[in-house]
Image: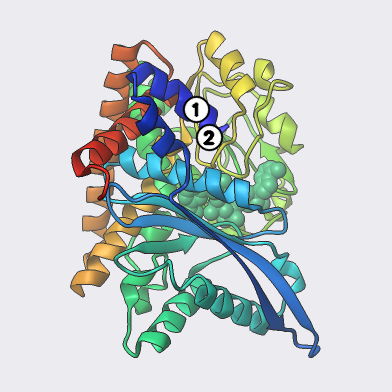
């Protein structure tokens, strides 16, 4: 899918074949198999990967995922998408991704820490504050980032906060990082609503997922004046056409699976039903492939803003675009996370930290800028927003590659 998307953009940009080849392959892939002594004393070997896709625009950047279903191909595709995402936001990074095939629910906290520290040591030849900077992804969090920072720092002999982002504030994390992705999603909702002449104050919004991204997006879109009528988590959803008390739900249930179903004054619906309920704006902020050829024609929203990575399949994209639905694509819509990760890295390198207000203002400015660039690209190439964003990302990376030239 990632290569196919690149081919579409390369074709529209009339990219040279050699350049297209450079961009379609990862620059580096590392596969590691490493042992961890479990609490029982037994030794278990885990498989992990770190992939750097392209470093033409700067050090590579991308999260570390701990999940039983990861593999080298998926990690590589995610690294490529990170390259385009950073380029669309115009931040000076290339794309990377890392993963370990593991079900963290089976590990104790001590085992998780040992696995993290050993994995980071194994991929230590690739990561570094000037070369490749990991961040959290599925199955990893601020605590895991703290262990990564500590492991690299122990090996160097001095503290290296810039080697990883998404850290706790007290270890060089950035104000505003936790809310950054959801905040960026809502900036995109506002921009897209303006383009579609929708009055946000009258818009009904459904948010799928009530974790970090979904719960923040729900809270902030409510603050922006919209009416949140539906939310869901992995267990199921709730819907009330008059609106839900989002702040209250956020304080009580954010990040706790099944919690929102305790709220009584709403209709209980399944996850798939929620996506098809009446609304103007849909924010999928859970997992990939939620809107497919099976349900795309039943979606009522006029605007979809992709908080999650890959929530709409390519077939769904076609059906929705034929229906006139505007989709703000993931590489634009959820880039707030990597943008504030970039701010965190800059602050760490300078040992000079910003206030939350400053972080939020800078984030909003970059996201609005990116949206405007993608909107212009959409009009000039007469294409959908996903392709328009990809064209910008691919062109920026291609231009950097041409400017740098091919060594030696
Ligand atoms: P999270 O683990 O905090 O939350 C995920 C939420 O999705 C939980 O509420 C979970 O219950 C819910 N969920 C899982 N399966 C579901 C289903 N089938 N239907 C409805 N809800 C379901 O994760 P997150 O950090 O909020 O990430 C959500 C998505 O956003 C992921 O696709 C992630 O890759 C993407 N993303 C996150 C960030 C970030 O900064 N956190 C940045 C960019 C993209």
- Residue extending farthest to the front is 408
Q: Are marks 2 and 1 in contact (CB under 8 Å)?
A: yes
**Residue drawn at the location 77% of the way across and 71% of the way down:** 106
Position of the N terminus by quadrant: top right
Q: CA distance from mark 2 to mark 1?
A: 5 Å
Residue 249 at least partly seen? no
For residue 52, side relative to residue 341 (left or right): right
Label 2 beta carbon less than 8 Å to ligand 1: no
**Residue drawn at the location 59% of the way across and 35% of the way down:** 311
**Residue that carries the numbered disc 2 in the rendered image:** 2
For mark 1, give the secondary structure: helix
**Residue that carries the numbered disc 1 in the rendered image:** 5
Given residues 391 and 326, the one toward you in this image is 391
Q: Is residue 385 above or below residue 172?
A: above
Given residues 22 and 319, the one toward you in this image is 22
Given residues 339 and 228, the one toward you in this image is 339
Q: x and y percent of residue 124 in the render?
A: 46, 73
Given residues 250 and 30, the one toward you in this image is 30
Q: Quadrant of residue 169?
A: bottom left
For residue 46, side relative to residue 164 (left or right): right
Q: Quadrant of residue 231?
A: top right
The disc at residue 301 is: none
Residue 357 at least partly seen? yes
**Residue drawn at the location 50% of the way across and 43% of the way down:** 218
Q: x and y percent of residue 372 in the render?
A: 26, 27
For mark 2, give the secondary structure: helix
For residue 307, side relative to residue 276 (left or right): left
- What's the coloring here? rainbow
Q: Is residue 403 above or below residue 125?
A: above
């Amino acid at each position: 899918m990632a290569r196919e998307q690149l081919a579409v953009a390369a074709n529209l940009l009339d990219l040279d074949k050699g350049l297209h080849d450079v961009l379609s392959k990862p620059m580096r892939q590392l596969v590691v198999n490493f042992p961890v002594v479990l609490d029982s004393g037994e030794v278990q070997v885990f498989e992990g990967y770190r992939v750097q896709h392209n470093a033409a625009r700067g050090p590579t950047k991308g999260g570390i995922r701990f999940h039983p279903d990861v593999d080298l191909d998926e990690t590589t595709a995610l690294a490529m998408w990170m390259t385009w995402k950073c380029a669309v936001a115009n931040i000076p990074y290339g794309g990377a991704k890392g993963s370990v095939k593991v079900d963290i629910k089976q590990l104790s906290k001590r085992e998780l820490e040992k696995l993290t520290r050993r994995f980071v040591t194994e991929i230590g030849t690739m990561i570094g504050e000037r070369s490749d900077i990991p961040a959290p992804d599925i199955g990893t969090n601020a605590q895991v980032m703290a262990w990564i920072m500590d492991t690299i720092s122990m090996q160097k002999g001095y503290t290296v906060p810039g080697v990883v982002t998404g850290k706790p504030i007290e270890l060089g994390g950035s104000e505003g990082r936790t809310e950054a992705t959801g905040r960026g999603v809502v900036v995109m909702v506002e921009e897209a609503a303006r383009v579609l002449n929708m009055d946000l104050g009258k818009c009904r919004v459904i948010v799928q997922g009530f974790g970090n991204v979904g719960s923040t997006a729900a809270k902030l879109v409510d603050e922006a004046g919209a009416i949140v009528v539906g939310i869901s988590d992995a267990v199921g959803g709730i819907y009330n056409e008059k609106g839900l008390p989002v702040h209250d739900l956020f304080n009580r249930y954010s990040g706790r699976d099944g919690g929102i179903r305790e709220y009584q004054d709403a209709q209980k619906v399944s996850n798939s039903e929620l996506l098809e309920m009446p609304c103007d704006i849909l924010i999928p902020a859970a997992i990939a492939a939620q809107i497919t050829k099976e349900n795309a024609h039943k979606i009522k929203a006029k605007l979809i803003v992709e908080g999650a990575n890959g929530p709409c399949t390519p077939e769904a994209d076609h059906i929705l675009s034929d229906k006139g639905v505007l989709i703000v694509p993931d590489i634009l819509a959820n880039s707030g996370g990597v943008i504030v990760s970039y701010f965190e890295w800059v602050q760490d390198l300078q040992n000079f930290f910003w206030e939350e207000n400053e972080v939020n203002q800078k984030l909003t400015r970059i996201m609005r800028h990116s949206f405007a660039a993608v909107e212009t690209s959409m009009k000039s190439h007469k294409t959908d927003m996903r392709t328009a964003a990809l064209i910008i990302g691919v062109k920026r990376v291609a231009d950097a590659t041409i400017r740098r030239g091919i060594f030696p």
